[in-house]
Amino acid sequence: MKQIKYLIIGGGVTGTTAAETIRQNDKENGIMIISDEPYRFYSRIMLSKPAFFLGKIPFDKIWLKTEEWYQKNNIELLAGRKAVKLDSRNKTVALDNGDKINYEKLLLAIGGHSRELQIPGSDKNGVLYLRNLSDAKAIAELVKTAKKSV
């Protein structure tokens, strides 16, 4: 079982900013961010811009932290993994691949999700939600051939 001082679940703005702040105040101890997304920290705001979907904003402009930033700050990013069980008594988190992480301090920075429409037609092809980079990529592909959008 891996042992870490600071465990952060959530790799978005809150989790990444928390890791950055912790590192400014503690140069020594381990920091790990677990993110269910397979990407490092990026701008969700940039994803909502029409210019992004039309290809007018280069894809590389969305990244807010480089891989080198994580290495330089000794912050371990465990991307593409989900925390599936929290045992606060034993200070462990189980991951979707069966691994367990033991922590001293834990921050849950899991954010929120939009609620899916519950109306007739909401299950049709082309009805999409913009929650993350994978959603934005799917929308950008459809925009290339769409005749109308809402």
Image (spheres, rainbow, N blue to C red):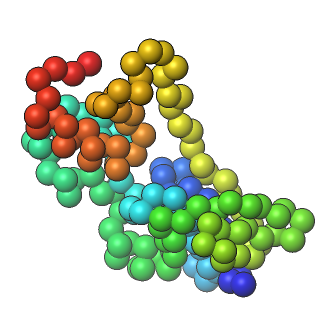
Q: With respect to residue 83, does 49 lie above or below? A: above
Q: In terms of image quadrants, where is residue 120?
A: top left
Can residue 136 be seen here? The reply is: yes
Q: Residue furthest top?
A: 120
Question: Which quadrant does the C terminus fall into?
Answer: top left
Report the side of 144 relative to 140 (left or right): left
State how many labels appear: 0
Report the side of 97 relative to 114 (left or right): right
Q: With respect to residue 117, does 9 lie above or below? A: below
- At which x and y percent is residue 1? 72, 84
Q: With respect to residue 52, does 58 lie above or below? A: below
Q: In terms of image quadrants, where is residue 71?
A: bottom left
- At which x and y percent is residue 35? 52, 61
Residue at image coords 45%, 58%: 37
Residue at image coords 11%, 23%: 147
Work out whether residue 135 or residue 66 is closer to the camera in this orientation and state it: 135
Residue at image coords 42%, 40%: 131
Q: With respect to residue 68, does 59 lie above or below? A: above
Report the side of 22 relative to 137 (left or right): right
Work out whether residue 48 or residue 24 is closer to the camera in this orientation and state it: 48
Report the side of 136 relative to 149 (left or right): right
- At which x and y percent is residue 133? 34, 49
Work out whether residue 35 or residue 126 is closer to the camera in this orientation and state it: 126
Residue at image coords 75%, 76%: 102
